[in-house]
């Protein structure tokens, strides 16, 4: 007998685990399979962006994540050096995690949100996502289980899964299959979908074969005595590198680009240690605890994000160069986007046509995000300072000052990126309303708050000091700026008819929020995107709004009956 679930997810990386949380929280039966024997242990991504933190806050565990990684008083500066024992060229100062809550309020005009980015190894985030998913009744996580293939019929999917511990095979029957199975995605390959875009364009740095070297070196802090930073970059003729502090006590990851004569396959840990010492420029005690190789210079996006009942997300559909730190963060938002849609369709609250808006919304964002990221790779990777930066005397000082000026402006662009993380929009989506107002400008370093439907809901601190986002419901939210209008009642009745959870938030006494939303009402989708704003005069208007937001307007058949669909979904469950 095949195992049964509404959704089977292939891959327990950040994308698959986040989706499991989104589905499990909504009571959708979900099986996650991963061929490894547990979640990843390599730090890999070190930047959790503000938007991902907002989603962790929505799920109730942002504070837990904020406590992971660097100590609470450790600065998250990005600093540039000739070598770590040599000259400091530039420094972009950023607050410690203990200071994040104060900083984000005081810099509201830059960050417009309740959460700052956080510097934490991906492995620790994954462990949290895993624990949260594991605790959900409707989620089953199965490690050492590899997807071999799948077939689709009219009613669903049958996934063929091999247990790598005992070699047995198991079939899983599900309504939908989601491939979150990374860069080598078996699911994408079986669908015959290819990536398109720039693959490993060469640069002096961040363009070619890279080596990650995991290092224990507490002496880095005691013997070099540089002011602490989260990231330390080097510029010299011998070894360009980037060292990220993992725990603030002595664990680091060094990223360096391999030269033509250096080969990842034959590199020993001893050889890798020499690369670390070249970047330090002095002999300090250390231990290499692991190495891994990867390719920089990529900006690849899949031609399609799925087919039929099979959908794809994360690295399976977009491969980044990690400058800007957006690969995993884009994967998290993929999971959030498809999570509420899959749940709504499985429960019969929305038309299956809604699922096609996943690609319509997320693919343009993947193209945008990979483009911004590769721009940062060009800015840092093609920059070659004068070789005189290591010289003593006035010529060396002048060269260092020129390099410092360049790197300071680069750091501001790459590491203060509210526009990049908060500003992605779904303007072409059929599941949001177009209200004819201008699309706000899109630049990585500037986020322009806008309640034009299709973008992240703009944030306001309310009069009692609380965050507007904490007032949103877990599913749909109606923001009310004109309580005298009967529209709130009409929307409430329409939502009830469709079995949609609608939180009604009266903001009539909140002038700051009213100025941001510029309307009598706004509907916020479960992913905190503005779906609609304006006012309505009768129940048919409320019907039309929800028809669009739940995909019914797109459905080929015009006989979608929410009550019957819910009943049908219950029977199938
Ligand atoms: C050096 C480096 C630094 C990075 N820094 C950042 C950063 O700062 N910020 C950022 O946002 N991103 C960063 N990234 C990118 C980030 O690590 C990835 O984008 C992220 O891991 C993608 O998550 P995912 O869930 O899509 O895929 P993955 O993390 O690759 O997970 C895929 C999972 O699928 C499983 N799997 C694969 N095939 C099968 C199968 N057939 N059956 C069962 N299971 C299968 C795998 O075992 C794996 O667990 C960095 C990447 C690198 C290499």
Image (cartoon, rainbow, N blue to C red):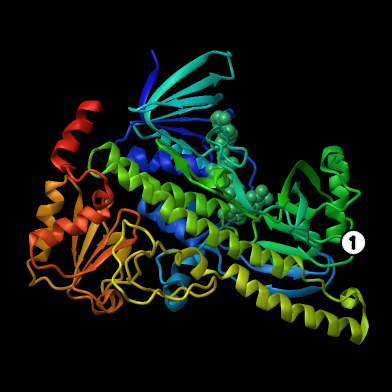
| Residue under the image location 26 percent in, 77 percent down | 518
**Whether the residue under disc 1 has CB within 8 Å of ligand 1:** no
Q: Is residue 26 visible?
A: no
Left or right side of 521 for 414: right
x, y (%) of residue 546?
A: 21, 55
Answer with the quarter of the image where residue 53 lies.
bottom left
Left or right side of 113 for 118: right
x, y (%) of residue 527?
A: 35, 54
Q: Is residue 30 visible?
A: yes
Disc 1 is placed on an element classified as: loop
x, y (%) of residue 340?
A: 33, 46
The quadrant of the picture occupied by the N terminus is top left
Answer with the quarter of the image where residue 22 lies.
top left
| Residue under the image location 15 percent in, 42 percent down | 561
Question: Is residue 227 placed above or below 171 in the rendered structure?
Answer: below
Work out whether residue 95 or residue 206 is closer to the camera in this orientation and state it: 206
Left or right side of 91 for 151: left
Q: Could you tell me how many numbered marks the image carries? A: 1
The quadrant of the picture occupied by the C terminus is top left
10 Å crowding of disc 1: few (<14), some (14-19), many (20+): few
**Quadrant of picture, ligand 1:** top right
| Residue under the image location 89 percent in, 60 percent down | 282
Work out whether residue 302 or residue 212 is closer to the camera in this orientation and state it: 302
Work out whether residue 557 or residue 308 is closer to the camera in this orientation and state it: 557
| Residue under the image location 68 percent in, 62 percent down | 231
x, y (%) of residue 266?
A: 87, 38
Residue marked by disc 1:
238
């Amino acid at each position: 007998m095949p195992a049964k679930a509404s959704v089977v997810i292939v891959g327990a990386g950040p994308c698959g685990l986040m989706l499991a949380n989104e589905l499990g929280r909504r009571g959708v039966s979900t099986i996650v399979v991963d061929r490894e024997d547990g979640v990843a242990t390599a730090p890999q991504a070190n930047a959790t962006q503000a938007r991902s933190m907002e989603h962790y806050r929505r799920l109730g565990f942002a504070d837990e994540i904020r406590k992971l990684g660097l100590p609470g008083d450790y600065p998250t500066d990005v600093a540039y050096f000739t070598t770590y024992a040599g000259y400091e060229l530039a420094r972009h100062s950023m607050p410690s995690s203990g200071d994040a809550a104060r900083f984000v309020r005081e810099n509201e005009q830059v960050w417009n949100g309740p959460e700052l980015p956080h510097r934490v190894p991906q492995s620790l985030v994954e462990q949290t996502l895993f624990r949260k998913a594991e605790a959900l009744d409707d989620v089953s996580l199965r490690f050492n289980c590899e997807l071999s293939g799948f077939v689709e019929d009219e009613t669903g999917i049958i996934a063929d899964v091999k247990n790598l511990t005992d070699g047995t095979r198991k079939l899983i029957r599900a309504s939908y299959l989601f491939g979150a199975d990374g860069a080598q995605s078996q699911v994408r390959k079986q669908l015959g979908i290819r990536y398109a875009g720039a693959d490993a364009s060469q640069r002096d740095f961040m363009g070619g074969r890279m080596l990650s070297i995991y290092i224990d070196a507490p002496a880095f802090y005691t013997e070099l005595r540089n002011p602490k930073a989260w990231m330390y970059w080097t510029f010299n003729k011998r070894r360009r590198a980037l060292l990220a502090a993992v725990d603030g006590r002595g664990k680091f990851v060094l990223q360096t680009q391999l030269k033509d004569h250096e080969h990842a396959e034959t590199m020993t840990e001893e050889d890798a240690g020499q690369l670390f010492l070249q970047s330090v420029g002095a002999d300090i005690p250390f231990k290499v605890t692991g190495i891994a190789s990867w390719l920089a210079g990529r900006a690849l996006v899949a031609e399609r994000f799925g087919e039929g009942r099979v959908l794809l997300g994360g690295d399976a559909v977009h491969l980044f160069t990690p400058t800007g730190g957006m690969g995993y963060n884009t994967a998290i938002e993929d999971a959030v986007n498809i999570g509420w849609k899959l749940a709504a369709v499985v429960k019969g609250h929305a038309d299956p046509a809604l699922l096609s808006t996943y690609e319509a919304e997320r693919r343009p964002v993947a193209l945008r995000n990979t483009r911004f990221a590769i721009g940062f790779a060009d800015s840092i990777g093609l920059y070659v300072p004068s070789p005189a930066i290591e010289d003593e005397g006035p010529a060396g000082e002048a060269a260092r000052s020129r390099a410092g000026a360049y790197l300071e402006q680069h750091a501001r662009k790459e590491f203060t990126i509210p526009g990049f993380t908060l500003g992605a929009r779904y303007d072409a989506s059929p599941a949001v309303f177009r209200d004819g107002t201008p699309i706000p400008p899109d630049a990585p370093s500037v986020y322009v708050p806008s309640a034009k439907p299709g973008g992240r809901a703009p944030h306001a601190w309310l009069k009692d000091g609380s965050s507007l986002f904490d007032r949103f419901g877990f599913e749909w939210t109606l923001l009310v700026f004109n309580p005298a209008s009967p529209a709130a009642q009409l929307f409430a009745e329409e939502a009830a008819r469709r079995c949609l959870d609608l939180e009604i938030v009266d903001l009539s006494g909140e002038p700051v929020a009213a100025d941001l939303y510029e309307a009598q009402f706004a509907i916020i989708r479960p992913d905190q995107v503005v779906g609609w704003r304006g006012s309505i005069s009768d129940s048919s208007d409320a019907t039309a709004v929800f028809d669009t937001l739940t995909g019914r307007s797109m459905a080929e058949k015009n006989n979608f009956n929410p009550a019957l669909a819910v009943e049908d979904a219950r029977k199938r469950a």
